[in-house]
Each structure stands twice: as C-alpha cells, then as structure tokens.
C-alpha cells in the first residue's frame, strides 16, 4: 500500500488547539494518513526520551516515522573537519530514527561550493563510501535506510541520476525523489514521460526491490533560472509538478511500498490527505 503523510506540523494541527508534536500521531491517524517526517534540518535538539515516546505513540497509531538529517551536511566538502561533522549529523539522526522506530533518514548530500561538479561528486563518492562503512558496522542488524535526496538548485549535488548512482553503493542507500526539486531543475518540464524515465533509470541501476521502497517528497515549488525558490501548496496553478502523472506511473509500475511525504507550505497534512484521496479514488 502506498502511504502518505506530512513533513512537520500543519497549521490546522495548531489551530485546533494542539501544541505538542506528541499529539500529532493520533491527529494524523484521524485524518487517515500513514506517515510523519520529523526534521532535524536546523539541528538535532530532540531528547532521547522524547524520541522514544514519539516512536511509541507513532506505533500505537500506525504512523510510520522518517527523519530528515540537518541541512548542514555536505559530503562534497574537501575539509576533513567538516566531513567529520557531517558524519556526526547523519549518525546522530540515525540514532534518533532508531529510537523513534523509523526506517528512513533523508539527507541533502552536498553542494559544489567552489569545486567543479566532477570534483564535488568525487568527494561525495569517497566520503559516502566511508560513511557507509561506519553505518554498516554500527547498524548492521538494523532495518534502516539512508535516503539521499534529489535537489532543486543547480549548484547542489542531487540530480536524479546522481542520486540513483550513489545509491548503487550500498544496500542501505535508497533515493528520496523530491519531485518538486526535480521539476525546478527541469524548469517546469516534469511530466509523465519524465516520471517514467526516472523510475526506469532507478529500476535499471538499483533493481525493482530497491525501487519499490522509494521515498518521495512532493510539493509544488516556485523556481527561477537558478532553481528552487520556495515551497507552495497544491492550490498553486502556476508552478508544478502535477501529481496525476506521478500517481499514474506509480500504479503502472506497481510501486506499492512507496512512501510519499507532502511538503506543502503550512498545510502539508491537509495537502497530503488530498494526495492520498486523489491517488486512491482515480
């Protein structure tokens, strides 16, 4: 079953009188949603005992948790101290994920900075390989995945081919396809044929088993010639991408284990419910 949920807490959640994330799992269940992505984007401040409580409450309400590692990660950085810090951000995120009984940790893999793209990719490959050795040793018996994300700006490492190629490196690497980001890089040209190309490339390089477990971020995003500007809601009629062709391709390829996180601005849960309703009624 394809599952849906939000990244973070919807404005409706707060307007209905809720003020603590521990309450969101029952709230999402009542909305008939399945997922929740907790972001450590600006740092990992969540205490271990709170993470454990989140995991228990999520499990009690049949909500599957994923996490997003801090935005500070950059595996393209040539500075060894910076790489050590990036490893720490990711390992700490995975530790919290395990406490929350989740499976998937999304990560922004890096940026070119002043490097050429080839140099940046070479650094990413080298450092990701080292990181996966650490992960393999530390989490060998854990059912968790690191999920590098496709990115929305041209200076960032993260075209869909780059991400898929990186995920050939290890069994615990699975892509996060952020189709809003991909649409920004394609300058609004993400359509049915492009969706098919992405999944065809994933199946070719990673196989159907990994592709079945794909993690998806979906939202409409405003973009410029440089890429992503800001997240929008599904109501926006100027920028894409459109969900209908993605839903069609997911059904056509029978990707029943896909997890779809909605990142609409402020109303991510309400829009996640719209996506789920659209997926299962059309």
Image (spheres, rainbow, N blue to C red):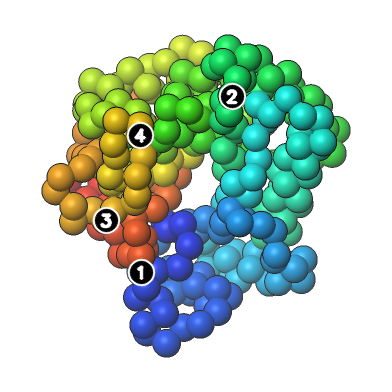
The quadrant where residue 221 appears: top left
- Residue 60's spot in the image, x, y percent? 58, 69
User: Of tags 3 and 1, which is closer to the observer?
Assistant: 3
User: Can you identify the residue that label 4 sits on?
Assistant: 227
Quarter of the C terminus within the rendering: top left
Please give the residue where the numbered disc 2 appears in the rendered image: 114
Q: Earlier in the sequence, mark 3 or mark 4?
A: 4
Dot 1 lies on which element? loop
Question: How many marks can you see?
Answer: 4
Q: Which residue is mark 1?
A: 31
Reading the image, the residue beneath label 3 is 233
Residue lying at 28% horizontally and 22% vertically, measured from the top left: 194
From the image, state whether disc 4 or disc 1 is nearer to you.
4
Q: Secondary structure at mark 4?
A: strand
Residue found at the far bottom of this picture: 17
Sequence order check, earlier mark of 1 and 2: 1
Instruction: Give the Cα distance between marks 3 and 1.
Output: 18 Å
| Cβ atoms at labels 1 and 2 below 8 Å apart | no
Mark sitting earlier along the chain (3/1):
1
**Badge 2 or badge 3: first in the primary sequence:** 2
Element class at badge 3: loop
Q: Nearer the viewer, mark 3 or mark 4?
A: 4
Whole-Å distance between the Cαs marked 4 and 1?
Answer: 33 Å
Q: Which of the two residues, 74 or 23, is positioned nearer the viewer here?
A: 74
In the image, residue 237 above or below residue 129: below
Location of residue 45 (image quadrant): bottom right
């Amino acid at each position: 079953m394809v599952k849906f949920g939000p990244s973070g807490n919807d404005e409706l959640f707060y307007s209905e009188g809720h003020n603590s994330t521990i309450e969101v799992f029952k709230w999402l269940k009542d909305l008939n949603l399945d997922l929740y992505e907790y972001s450590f984007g600006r740092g990992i401040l969540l205490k271990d005992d709170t993470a454990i409580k989140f995991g228990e409450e999520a499990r009690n309400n049949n909500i599957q948790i994923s996490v997003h590692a801090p935005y500070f990660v950059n595996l393209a950085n040539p500075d060894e101290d910076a790489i050590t810090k990036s490893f720490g951000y990711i390992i700490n995120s995975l530790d919290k994920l395990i406490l929350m009984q989740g499976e998937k940790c999304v990560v922004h893999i890096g940026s070119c900075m002043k490097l050429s793209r080839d140099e940046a990719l070479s650094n990413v490959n080298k450092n990701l390989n080292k990181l996966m050795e650490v992960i393999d040793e530390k989490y060998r018996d854990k059912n968790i995945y690191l999920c590098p994300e496709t990115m929305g700006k041209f200076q960032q490492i993260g075209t869909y081919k780059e991400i898929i190629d990186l995920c050939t490196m290890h069994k615990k690497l699975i892509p996060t396809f952020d189709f809003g980001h991909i649409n920004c890089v394609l300058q609004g040209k993400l359509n049915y044929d492009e969706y098919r190309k992405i999944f065809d490339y994933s199946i070719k390089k990673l196989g159907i088993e990994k592709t079945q477990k794909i993690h998806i971020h979906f939202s409409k995003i405003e973009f410029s010639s440089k890429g992503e500007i800001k997240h929008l809601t599904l109501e926006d009629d100027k920028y894409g991408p459109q969900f209908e062709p993605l839903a069609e391709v997911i059904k056509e390829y029978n990707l029943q284990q896909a997890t779809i996180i909605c990142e609409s601005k402020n109303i991510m849960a309400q829009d996640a419910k719209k996506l789920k309703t659209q997926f299962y009624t059309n």
